[in-house]
Image (cartoon, rainbow, N blue to C red):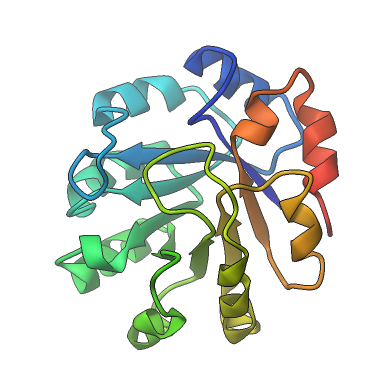
Amino acid sequence: MISVSFLKSKYSKKETIQLIEDSKADFIHVDLMDGIYVKENNFTIDEIMDLLKNVKKSLDIHLMVYNPLIYIKELVKLKPSIITIHLDGTPNIEETIDYLKKNDVKVGLAINPDENEHIIDNYLDKIDYVLIMSVYPGEGGQKFIPEVLEKINYFEDKLLIGIDGGINEDSIKLLKNYHIDIIVSGSYICMSDNFNERIDELNIK
Protein backbone atom coordinates (compact mmCIF):
# COMPACT_ATOMS: atom_id res chain seq x y z
CA MET A 1 0.00 0.00 0.00
CA ILE A 2 1.09 3.56 -0.69
CA SER A 3 0.71 6.42 1.79
CA VAL A 4 1.37 9.86 0.29
CA SER A 5 2.73 12.72 2.39
CA PHE A 6 1.90 16.31 1.43
CA LEU A 7 4.85 17.72 3.41
CA LYS A 8 6.74 18.85 0.28
CA SER A 9 4.85 19.57 -2.93
CA LYS A 10 4.82 21.79 -6.01
CA TYR A 11 1.18 22.57 -5.26
CA SER A 12 -0.56 24.29 -2.34
CA LYS A 13 -1.41 22.14 0.66
CA LYS A 14 -5.12 22.09 -0.22
CA GLU A 15 -4.42 21.27 -3.86
CA THR A 16 -1.98 18.52 -2.87
CA ILE A 17 -4.43 16.92 -0.47
CA GLN A 18 -7.12 16.95 -3.15
CA LEU A 19 -4.74 15.41 -5.69
CA ILE A 20 -3.87 12.63 -3.21
CA GLU A 21 -7.57 12.20 -2.46
CA ASP A 22 -8.25 11.72 -6.19
CA SER A 23 -5.27 9.40 -6.74
CA LYS A 24 -4.67 5.66 -6.36
CA ALA A 25 -3.00 6.25 -2.98
CA ASP A 26 -4.22 4.04 -0.13
CA PHE A 27 -3.64 6.70 2.55
CA ILE A 28 -3.00 10.38 2.99
CA HIS A 29 0.10 10.53 5.19
CA VAL A 30 -0.02 13.43 7.65
CA ASP A 31 3.30 14.64 9.07
CA LEU A 32 2.82 16.86 12.11
CA MET A 33 5.87 18.44 13.78
CA ASP A 34 5.93 20.65 16.87
CA GLY A 35 9.35 22.37 16.86
CA ILE A 36 10.21 20.50 20.09
CA TYR A 37 10.64 16.84 19.21
CA VAL A 38 12.06 18.00 15.87
CA LYS A 39 13.28 21.47 14.91
CA GLU A 40 10.61 21.98 12.27
CA ASN A 41 7.19 23.30 13.29
CA ASN A 42 4.87 22.84 10.35
CA PHE A 43 1.19 22.96 11.37
CA THR A 44 -0.97 23.87 14.30
CA ILE A 45 -3.56 21.32 15.26
CA ASP A 46 -6.28 23.73 14.04
CA GLU A 47 -4.64 23.96 10.61
CA ILE A 48 -4.50 20.18 10.31
CA MET A 49 -8.12 19.78 11.38
CA ASP A 50 -9.18 22.37 8.80
CA LEU A 51 -7.08 20.90 5.96
CA LEU A 52 -8.37 17.37 6.51
CA LYS A 53 -11.95 17.89 7.66
CA ASN A 54 -13.51 16.84 4.35
CA VAL A 55 -11.18 14.05 3.20
CA LYS A 56 -12.61 10.61 2.54
CA LYS A 57 -9.37 8.69 2.00
CA SER A 58 -7.87 6.86 4.98
CA LEU A 59 -5.55 8.95 7.12
CA ASP A 60 -2.15 7.74 8.29
CA ILE A 61 -0.89 10.31 10.82
CA HIS A 62 2.75 10.53 11.92
CA LEU A 63 3.30 12.66 15.02
CA MET A 64 6.84 13.99 15.33
CA VAL A 65 5.89 15.81 18.51
CA TYR A 66 6.58 15.72 22.23
CA ASN A 67 3.65 14.44 24.29
CA PRO A 68 1.44 13.42 21.33
CA LEU A 69 -1.62 12.69 23.47
CA ILE A 70 -2.39 16.43 23.46
CA TYR A 71 -2.73 16.27 19.67
CA ILE A 72 -4.35 12.85 19.54
CA LYS A 73 -7.37 13.97 21.55
CA GLU A 74 -8.25 16.31 18.67
CA LEU A 75 -7.02 14.15 15.80
CA VAL A 76 -9.24 11.18 16.66
CA LYS A 77 -12.18 13.36 15.52
CA LEU A 78 -10.87 12.86 11.97
CA LYS A 79 -11.26 9.08 12.42
CA PRO A 80 -7.75 8.22 11.19
CA SER A 81 -6.79 4.65 10.37
CA ILE A 82 -3.33 4.85 11.97
CA ILE A 83 -1.54 7.24 14.30
CA THR A 84 2.21 6.73 14.70
CA ILE A 85 4.20 8.17 17.59
CA HIS A 86 7.82 8.10 18.75
CA LEU A 87 8.71 6.28 21.95
CA ASP A 88 11.25 8.90 23.06
CA GLY A 89 8.71 11.68 22.54
CA THR A 90 5.91 10.02 24.51
CA PRO A 91 6.32 10.27 28.31
CA ASN A 92 2.89 8.67 28.90
CA ILE A 93 3.22 5.81 26.43
CA GLU A 94 0.79 3.37 28.07
CA GLU A 95 -1.92 6.01 28.44
CA THR A 96 -1.42 7.11 24.83
CA ILE A 97 -1.67 3.57 23.46
CA ASP A 98 -4.79 2.91 25.53
CA TYR A 99 -6.42 6.12 24.31
CA LEU A 100 -5.81 5.23 20.67
CA LYS A 101 -7.15 1.71 21.19
CA LYS A 102 -10.30 3.03 22.86
CA ASN A 103 -10.88 5.25 19.84
CA ASP A 104 -10.41 2.42 17.31
CA VAL A 105 -7.21 3.83 15.84
CA LYS A 106 -4.33 1.53 14.90
CA VAL A 107 -1.27 2.30 17.03
CA GLY A 108 2.07 2.79 15.33
CA LEU A 109 5.54 3.23 16.81
CA ALA A 110 8.29 4.78 14.68
CA ILE A 111 11.95 3.78 14.82
CA ASN A 112 14.49 6.41 13.81
CA PRO A 113 17.56 5.47 11.73
CA ASP A 114 19.87 5.59 14.75
CA GLU A 115 17.54 3.57 17.01
CA ASN A 116 17.69 -0.19 17.51
CA GLU A 117 14.61 -2.18 16.53
CA HIS A 118 14.47 -3.73 20.00
CA ILE A 119 13.55 -0.41 21.65
CA ILE A 120 9.87 -1.22 21.06
CA ASP A 121 10.02 -4.86 22.23
CA ASN A 122 7.99 -4.12 25.36
CA TYR A 123 5.10 -2.84 23.24
CA LEU A 124 4.91 -5.40 20.43
CA ASP A 125 1.78 -6.99 21.88
CA LYS A 126 0.08 -3.60 22.34
CA ILE A 127 0.64 -1.93 18.96
CA ASP A 128 -0.41 -2.64 15.38
CA TYR A 129 2.23 -1.04 13.21
CA VAL A 130 5.93 -0.23 13.12
CA LEU A 131 7.21 2.62 10.95
CA ILE A 132 10.86 2.22 9.96
CA MET A 133 12.25 5.70 9.36
CA SER A 134 14.65 5.67 6.41
CA VAL A 135 15.52 9.34 6.96
CA TYR A 136 15.80 11.39 10.14
CA PRO A 137 12.43 12.86 11.14
CA GLY A 138 11.77 16.54 10.66
CA GLU A 139 12.48 17.45 7.06
CA GLY A 140 11.12 16.34 3.68
CA GLY A 141 13.24 15.48 0.67
CA GLN A 142 16.11 13.68 2.47
CA LYS A 143 18.16 10.85 0.96
CA PHE A 144 17.19 7.25 1.76
CA ILE A 145 19.37 5.48 4.38
CA PRO A 146 19.70 1.84 3.18
CA GLU A 147 21.13 0.54 6.47
CA VAL A 148 17.67 0.69 8.08
CA LEU A 149 16.48 -2.19 5.90
CA GLU A 150 18.21 -4.61 8.28
CA LYS A 151 15.47 -3.87 10.84
CA ILE A 152 12.57 -4.99 8.68
CA ASN A 153 12.93 -8.78 8.94
CA TYR A 154 12.71 -8.65 12.73
CA PHE A 155 9.11 -7.42 12.55
CA GLU A 156 7.83 -9.76 9.85
CA ASP A 157 4.81 -11.76 11.07
CA LYS A 158 4.64 -9.55 14.19
CA LEU A 159 3.14 -6.25 12.96
CA LEU A 160 2.18 -4.22 9.95
CA ILE A 161 5.42 -2.72 8.64
CA GLY A 162 5.88 0.68 7.04
CA ILE A 163 8.89 2.55 5.70
CA ASP A 164 9.13 6.32 5.46
CA GLY A 165 11.70 8.63 3.94
CA GLY A 166 13.56 9.14 0.69
CA ILE A 167 11.43 6.72 -1.31
CA ASN A 168 11.84 7.24 -5.06
CA GLU A 169 12.49 5.29 -8.28
CA ASP A 170 15.97 4.30 -7.08
CA SER A 171 15.38 3.43 -3.42
CA ILE A 172 12.24 1.43 -4.23
CA LYS A 173 14.48 -1.13 -5.97
CA LEU A 174 16.14 -1.86 -2.61
CA LEU A 175 12.79 -2.75 -1.03
CA LYS A 176 11.69 -5.49 -3.39
CA ASN A 177 13.09 -8.33 -1.28
CA TYR A 178 11.54 -7.12 1.96
CA HIS A 179 8.09 -7.53 3.43
CA ILE A 180 6.66 -3.99 3.67
CA ASP A 181 2.96 -3.31 4.04
CA ILE A 182 2.94 0.49 3.70
CA ILE A 183 5.38 2.59 1.68
CA VAL A 184 5.32 6.28 2.59
CA SER A 185 6.41 8.72 -0.09
CA GLY A 186 6.11 12.47 -0.30
CA SER A 187 8.15 14.70 -2.57
CA TYR A 188 8.72 11.98 -5.20
CA ILE A 189 4.98 11.91 -5.82
CA CYS A 190 3.92 15.44 -4.90
CA MET A 191 6.64 17.24 -6.88
CA SER A 192 5.51 15.41 -10.03
CA ASP A 193 2.89 16.20 -12.66
CA ASN A 194 1.26 12.78 -12.44
CA PHE A 195 0.61 11.33 -8.98
CA ASN A 196 -0.82 8.03 -10.21
CA GLU A 197 2.16 7.37 -12.47
CA ARG A 198 4.54 7.79 -9.53
CA ILE A 199 2.32 5.71 -7.23
CA ASP A 200 2.35 2.87 -9.80
CA GLU A 201 6.16 3.01 -9.89
CA LEU A 202 6.31 2.53 -6.11
CA ASN A 203 3.68 -0.20 -5.83
CA ILE A 204 5.96 -3.23 -5.52
CA LYS A 205 3.24 -5.60 -4.27
Say which residue appears at 46% left-offset and 38% top-offset: 30
Q: Residue at x 51, y 12 (%)?
A: 12
- Asked whether 130 or 191 is in front, the reply is 191
In the depicted structure, whether residue 33 falls above or below residue 47: below
Say whether residue 115 is left or right of residue 201: left
Give the quadrant of the C terminus: bottom right
Where is residue 4, by image quadrant? top right
Image mark count:
0
Rendered position, 22 above or below 34: above
Residue 101 percent across, percent down from the top left: 36, 65
Residue 172, above or below 55: below
- Find residue 64 and report its horizontal and vertical position in percent: 32, 49
What residue lies at 24% left-to-right and 66% top-to-bottom?
88
Depth check: 74 or 142 in front?
Answer: 142
Q: Is residue 23 left or right of residue 54?
A: right
In this image, 52 relative to 100: left or right?
A: right
Where is residue 113? Give x, y as percent: 45, 65
- Residue 20 found in image quarter: top right
Kindly indicate the quadrant of the structure image that contains residue 19. Answer: top right
